[in-house]
Amino acid sequence: MGSGPPGLLPLLLLASFIHTWHCTRGQSSYIIDAVGLTILPGSTVESGTAVTVRCQVSVSHNNIPHLTHTFQLTQDDVLIHSSTTTEDSIEYELNPARAADSGNYECRVTVKDKSKTSVRHKLDVTGLQTPNLHLNNLSPYENEEFTATCSAPEEKGSLIFRFYQRFRTGEPEKMKQLATTGNSTETTLRLKHIGDCFLFCDYEIHLVSGTRRSNNSEEIQVIIRALNISPIMNVLPSNDVYEGDIVDVVCKVVGSPLKNIEVFLTKDRRILKKVAATALSHQFTAEEVGSGELMCKAEWGSVQKESYRTITVKELFSKPRLTVEPSDLFEGDRFIMSCSVSIYVPDKINNETIRYSYYKDNVKITSAGTYISVAHSHKNGNYTCNAQASSADHTFIKESPTLIIKAKVPVSKPVLSAVGGTLLLGKPFQLRCHSDSGTLPIMYTLHGPNRLTQQKVVSRPEEEAVFNIAAIFKSTDLNNFVCHAKNSPRKPPMVGLGQQLLRSTIIIEPVSEPALTIYPGVGDISEGHNMTLICSVQKGSPPINFTWYHKEKKEALDSQLSNKLQRSYSIHNVRGDHGGEYYCVVTNQAKETRQSPAVMIGVKLAGWKKGLIVVVCILFILALILVVAFRRRLLHFKRKKTGKLSVKSASTKAERLSLTQAEVNEAANVTPGMMGKSIWSEHVSGSESDDQNSAIAAEKPEPQYTEVQTTQTDPNRVAPVKQGTDTVYSEVRNSQQGVPELADGVSVEYAQLNHDADHEGDHSTQGDQTAGGEHTYEVDNSVTTDAAAEPEE
């Protein structure tokens, strides 16, 4: 930044100083040091003394011109003076001071936004002014009103004035007490006692410090004069008269010099006549007024005098009396209405002169001696009758008291209904018997099965005839209930039958115990098939809820709501884990849950699994046979190595050992459990010859046995051989030419057991080396032979 002119900086400093000085002057400082209150001439003064209350303030400030002070002077915390001035003190004059000025004074001074209060000082003004009493009439008449005034002109505040009466003997008696906001009061007084008495007054004032009472005023003597305006009353012809007689009443005030007297004749607080004079006369017919007390009253100003006379008016005949028969009237009943009177003075009134008129709701309906009609709703109303009779000089009309006719409504046919509209068989229930119309009270009687009889009287509109009934188990039992309703002793009861219950009631029959059946049967369920669980009940009101459970599972298998008595649940592609115990649960609106007995279900293996097991077993047996055969061959091979066996020459055909038919039959009867069992051929030596004699061909060959499987039974045989794998034994004999002969009809399975392991498969070149020339052949429905065993060289 560039530098300014050379003289600019001093000017800025000067302007800043001037601005600061002005700001300092604008912020005035002050403090209220003290506020003082002074009461002169002192804190306790006599009533009527001039008192000055002075308030002064001391304020310290920094030369604030025209500083103003607001003074607030209070008496017992009530503001009595306020002023704002520049002076530091004010004065408040109490001239003269009265008792009402007594209290605690305090001065509060406010300067701008600060204020301060002086110490509180108490002023006590002693003494009260004696009141003055003034009466406007010193000799009033008895009960005459006059004015009394009590005042204390020099006092201030709210005063309470009291007026007293004192007789020559006795204590003063307070007559009145009045509260005013001023220093005087005016009231009216009335004195009853004839003679002289003395009246005076006083007052009291309520201050914060307490209540103060003044002295009594001067007593004033008052003389009460007697007022002779009591009227005299005469009744002619006498106090006892008959209805229709003319009665004269005279009421007079005698010997009074007063004027402006008013006379009244009254009966039962009703003014019969009034005159502004000292005498009154009045004439009336006896039946117009009737028996009672007549009063004659004279009034002068506020003073009243009375006299009384009792008059008795005798009836020639009674008021008519209206009656109806029957008194208990129902709609549809024929009724007779009669009007009658009692005659007291037959000399003046006879029964032949009396005429009757009947009225309904003030409308004349007949002038006959009686009124006959049939009760109905439009006949209901207020009925009266008039009796008109005439004497020698007067005609009398008297009206009967009102008779209210309201015919009762006969009870209608009752209706039986189940409370709630629903009935559970086997459970207690409630029946309601109700008539749509009928005047209360109505007696309901319920009859039911097993001599059931119950009664209930309905007297209020909100009541109902409800009966508690024991459980029934058949819906047809409802037909046995009957309800009687009656509200008239002269009419038969109305009957409600129970047949309507079947139409109007929802009857819920609890479900019976369910039965669970399985399709197909329990023993016919196999893997892979479908299974159906059928849950059924014999009875129960629909809808019925069926639920199936597997005992080993917590949750339900299925739940169905049906209007039928049975439902089914199917399980497709049954597995082994579907076996176990099953049961079903049923319920309906009766809220009774029933469970079926549990059914045990076993699941069989699938057919292909059974076949697989059989095949595996057969393969296992064949494998076992092969193992055993291999071991046998191995054993034979070892024997061949250890020593040569002599080959015996073939014997003649007669010398052969033949397989008897019994042996064949015995072989055919081998049990199936022995099927597939291998029987191996056994070499039996016919003699004890040595190995050196084995070369002799003429010796008889030993019989050999082998396993034979019969595949077909010859029907020409006596003992047929069982087809299959039954094992039989067959004798194999070597012919002279070296070809073995087989028994007739037997198939021989070929098994070369005696070949040497070193010459296997080479019969043409090494066949002469076999030991003993023994071979086993397989034959199917025919005898198949191998080449003749070459004799051993």
Image (tube, helix red, strand yellow):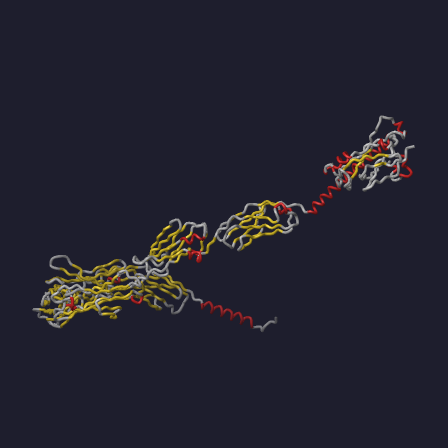
Q: Nearer the viewer, residue 733 or 241?
A: 733
Instruction: Give the quadrant of residue 311.
Output: bottom left
Tell which residue pokes out farthest to the bottom in this image: 5
In the rendered image, the quadrant that contains the C terminus is top right
User: Residue 306 location, x and y as percent?
Assistant: 13, 65
Rendered view: 484 above or below 274: above
User: Residue 469 location, x and y as percent?
Assistant: 40, 51
Q: Is residue 331 visible?
A: yes
User: Residue 728 location, x and y as percent?
Assistant: 77, 36
Report the number of discs: 0
User: Residue 455 location, x and y as percent?
Assistant: 35, 52
Tell which residue pokes out farthest to the left in this image: 255
Q: Tell me: 760 left or right of 364.
A: right
In the rendered image, the quadrant that contains the N terminus is bottom right
Instruction: Give the quadrant of residue 356.
Output: bottom left
Q: Is residue 136 visible?
A: no
Rendered view: 562 above or below 605: below
Q: Nearer the viewer, residue 521 or 48?
A: 521
Q: Tell me: 340 left or right of 716.
A: left
Q: Tell me: 227 left or right of 38.
A: left
Instruction: Give the quadrant of residue 645.
Output: top right
